[in-house]
Image (cartoon, rainbow, N blue to C red):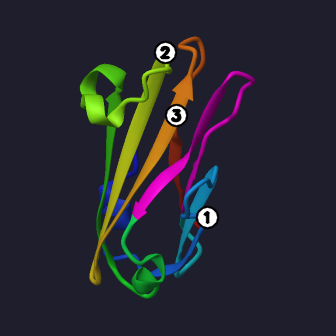
Amino acid sequence: MIPQDKLFMLVIESIEGLEEGSDEVTIRFVGGSHINQWHDQDCCESVTVNQVDGNVSKHIGAQVYGFEEKVLARDELSPEQLPDYLESLTATFYTLKTSKGYLDWRWYGESNGYYSESVESKFFEK
């Protein structure tokens, strides 16, 4: 869980890896703190950024107002969001609220059900 109180009003210096197919995202803040997101891949699963809604570069220099995470498993998704062939999937949604609007992205994990599909999302202070 990302500590909201430590993020509030930080200024975004850069956003790296926030693109479809990426397996690591880093959001750096002025002063040296950063958020890192990744998944430790195993042999029989895949977890990557699947969708980005918004202009990533627009948020450079913006102040952070909030950061939200929502995790949905296969049984919580609508039939339109589900491929027929997967035994297990997890969709992890993120919303970054800034002084320049909203930036939303989704990580999509799929496996045979025996492997983790979770995203590690950690805040590192300088």
Query: Which residue is disc 1 drawn over?
Result: 17
Amino acid on which the number 1 mark rests in the picture: Gly
Amino acid on which the number 3 mark rests in the picture: Gly
Q: Is residue 91 magenta?
A: no
Observer-side mark, 3 or 2, equals 2
| N-term mark: 1 or 3 | 1
User: Residue 66: where, in percent of width, then height?
Assistant: 28, 63
Which residue is at 69% across, 33% downward? 41
Query: Which residue is disc 2 drawn over?
Result: 87
Could you tell me how far apart the alpha carbons at marks 1 and 2 are, in whole angstroms? 28 Å
Query: Which residue is disc 3 drawn over?
Result: 109
> Badge 2 local density, few (<14 within 10 Å), some, or many (20+)?
few
Please name whichever residue, 17 or 123, is drawn nearer the observer in this view of the structure: 17
On the question of residue 117 being in view, the answer is no
Mark count: 3
| Residue contact at pointers 1 and 2, CB within 8 angstroms | no
Judged from the image, the secondary structure of the residue bearing numbered disc 1 is: loop
| N-term mark: 3 or 2 | 2
